[in-house]
Image (spheres, grey):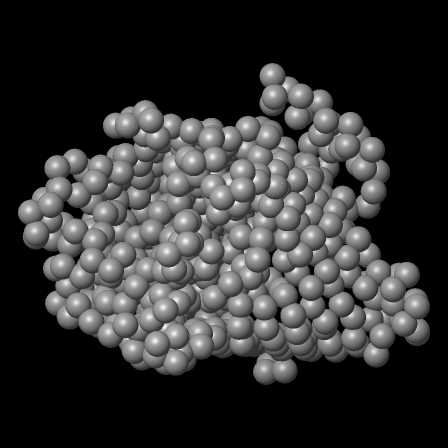
Amino acid sequence: MLRSYLLFILIPLISVTQEVKVKQKLNCDMTLDYRRLPKDQNSFADALTNGIFYGRLRFHEFFYENPNDHSQDHQIAGVGGSMIYKSGYLSGVGFTTALYTSYNPWHLADAEASIYKSGKDTLSRYDAATEGDYALNSLAQAYIEYQDKQSSLKIGRQRFESFLVKSNDTKMIPNTFEGVSLETRLIPSTRMRTALFTKQKLRDHSEFHHVLAYDDSSEPYAKWLENDDGGMHQGLTVSKLQANGIDDRLLVLDFKNTALEKTVLRLNYTAVPELISSVTAEGTHRFDVDKSKVMPSLRIMQQFDEGAGAIGGANLMTNTIGYQNPDSLKARLVAARIDFIQEVWSLRFGYSSVSDEGDIVTPWRGFPTLNYSRAMGQKNWQANTDSFLIRADYNLGRAGIIPTMRIVSRYAIQNFDDSKPGVPSDSRVWTLNIVKKGFPDYPTLYSKIRFAHVESERNTVAIDGSIKPDDTYNELRLELNYLF
């Protein structure tokens, strides 16, 4: 009944706005790209009045089933959207503000907020548990920008896209950062992005918080106040950093070079000084075979421990049993893939391997194994983890079957270290995505259906004699995006 009522509300809204020219688009990973940008103006008044508004309506619904414990089963929905305003530019200077909102029309009881899995990013669990508040509102972007033909400098709250630092805008509100960033193409055939961020706002937070500090205060539900991302190291707490005089800051330097024909080279440096840093190199080359393409890729990442291991330990969950050096976060990732691409279909084989040292720390919504071995919702970059993935992609639109529709399926095998109680048990993951971009009467309406089945091994005994949890589950996600 509630779902029918919600659609009854949304359809008239879509009908009213469908004639407005679309000024933004969604790419495959759900980040926004602007099709039309404001122009240079001759006065401050013109810069304000000739700015552009970008609107977005969103609807998400999540169904989660735990076959081993149906008390964990739940359903949650998010209804909301965003309104972005970009001013015109005066002598290259302009500004952008973006207000985002999400509301849960149906949900679990307030005290059950910890049960939520993927749907948790439609609300603030802290606000729900402490105040019964299911409305999440955030001024997630507010920055001043200076730009010329080759460069853009932004100061304030903003989205940022690099190897480990991303907006990851797949739910209701993106992951954003507070600080300064520069993007430039001054080097021929090279895009460089660099940033220094002092704060982060995860997707299920309304307020900005630490970039690498987990809240360990005695306040009820305090664990959801600071950086509580799934890739966060829970041993790097606010009190420990304060005791060591460390003020966490996030530094990023990211290069993409296309100087070599049919080749893309990437280099990334990400660091939180006095705690941890990493260097990643990646190369992709394209071979053209008749009407097909073959694209091999290789990624190598080295994580350096600059003090974080001694503070928090080698394991993200602080359980260092089975680690060769429990006080070191030194780690290395090697990943490879090969893509076979034709006009209507593509096939990918991917692999990743993490050294038997420390876990990789990455709570900024960029995933080390993304596009290689990561399947939907998975975290497979703990120490001594090998993963294999096969992905099949079929474009029904190009095949002339259903316009603008794609089907993408993944199957992943995740082999974790059985001896370590602080990492999951081995699992098999199957996912199915059905994406439809545009409908005859509503060309800017995007829809997506995603399903995941995760089969976790049972009765895995760790080195300390404990039995690892069985993390088997089924999940269904429904999503609508309307841009105007």
From the viewer's perspective, is residue 66 above or below residue 132?
above
Residue located at (58% from left, 53% from top): 206
Q: Quadrant of residue 404?
A: top right
Image location of residue 39, percent across then percent down = 84, 66
Q: Nearer the viewer, residue 144 or 254?
A: 144
Residue located at (60% from left, 45% from top): 136
For residue 12, side relative to residue 405 (left or right): right
Quarter of the rendering occupied by the N terminus: top right
Q: Nearer the viewer, residue 40 or 284?
A: 40
Quarter of the rendering occupied by the C terminus: top right
Residue located at (63% from left, 58% from top): 140
Residue located at (64% from left, 19% from top): 4
Image location of residue 346, percent across then percent down = 44, 45
Q: Residue furthest bottom?
A: 187
- Residue 352 visible, this angle: no
- Residue 95 visible, this angle: yes
From the viewer's perspective, is residue 92 above or below residue 81?
below
For residue 421, side relative to residue 399 (left or right): left
From the viewer's perspective, is residue 480 above or below residue 26?
above
Image location of residue 464, percent across then percent down = 8, 52
Q: Residue furthest top?
A: 1
For residue 234, side relative to residue 147 (left or right): left
Q: Nearer the viewer, residue 407 or 230?
A: 230
Q: Nearer the viewer, residue 352 or 110?
A: 110
Label total for image: 0
Image location of residue 352, percent across then percent down = 29, 57
